[in-house]
Image (spheres, rainbow, N blue to C red):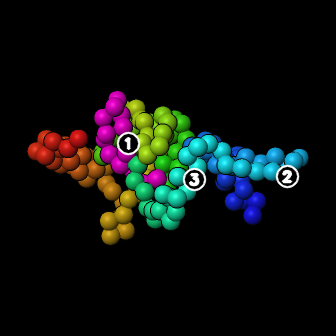
Amino acid sequence: MKTYLAILLGNGELKERYVYAKIWIDYDKNQFGKRGRLTRMLYSTNIGTIPDSTVVAVKCDGETIGRIEQIFMEKLKKGDSFVIGGGIYIFNYGRGMTINVSSASGPLIIPSWFSQQLPLAFDLALDIRRFKALLDQKFEYK
């Protein structure tokens, strides 16, 4: 029960994940209530809509360079570096369903990638990056 209250109250590190308080509690007066005008609408429109897998956009200098799983994003800390699309990037911050990165080089935290249980080779990552760039040119994705 305490865990549910912590979520509804937006306590602890939940604020860092942009989970804000939905209710207020006054323990002295033994009272509680909703926080904000949109709480009822949020609950009525979001019941049971938690996806089993979520993808987050990765942006560098305002341009989308790829996507990563939300679970990977949640493990990133400011300054962590990782490979995406054959390039090395440093995690700056996350906001909503987008993370901001900067081009980099150096030691990495490499996300898991499986293809018949084999790791992604660096040369293959570069080829995939070139192929994706070619597709972007042909189809003009935004």
Task: Measure the C-alpha gap from mark 1 to mark 3.
Answer: 32 Å
The tag on residue 42 is none
Query: Which mark's residue is nearer the viewer, 2 or 1?
Result: 2
Amino acid under label 3? Arg
Q: Is residue 60 magenta?
A: yes
Q: Is residue 133 above or below residue 71?
A: above
Residue at the image position 24 percent from the left and 46 percent from the top: 129
Q: Is residue 41 above or below residue 92?
A: below
Q: Which residue is labeled 2 in the image? A: 30
Seen from the viewer's position, the closer of residues 104 and 32 is 32
**Along the horizontal axis of the image, is 46 left or right of 116?**
right
Q: Which residue is labeled 3 in the image? A: 40
Seen from the viewer's position, the closer of residues 31 and 87 is 31
Of pointers 2 and 3, the one earlier in the residue sequence: 2
Amino acid under label 1? Val
Task: Measure the C-alpha gap from mark 2 to mark 3.
Answer: 22 Å
Residue 81 visible, this orientation:
no
Q: Name the main secondary structure of what is drawn in magenta.
A: strand
Callout 3: SS? helix
The image position of residue 119, as x and y in percent, is 36, 60
Q: Which residues are magenta?
A: 57-70
Amino acid under label 2? Asn
Callout 1: SS? strand
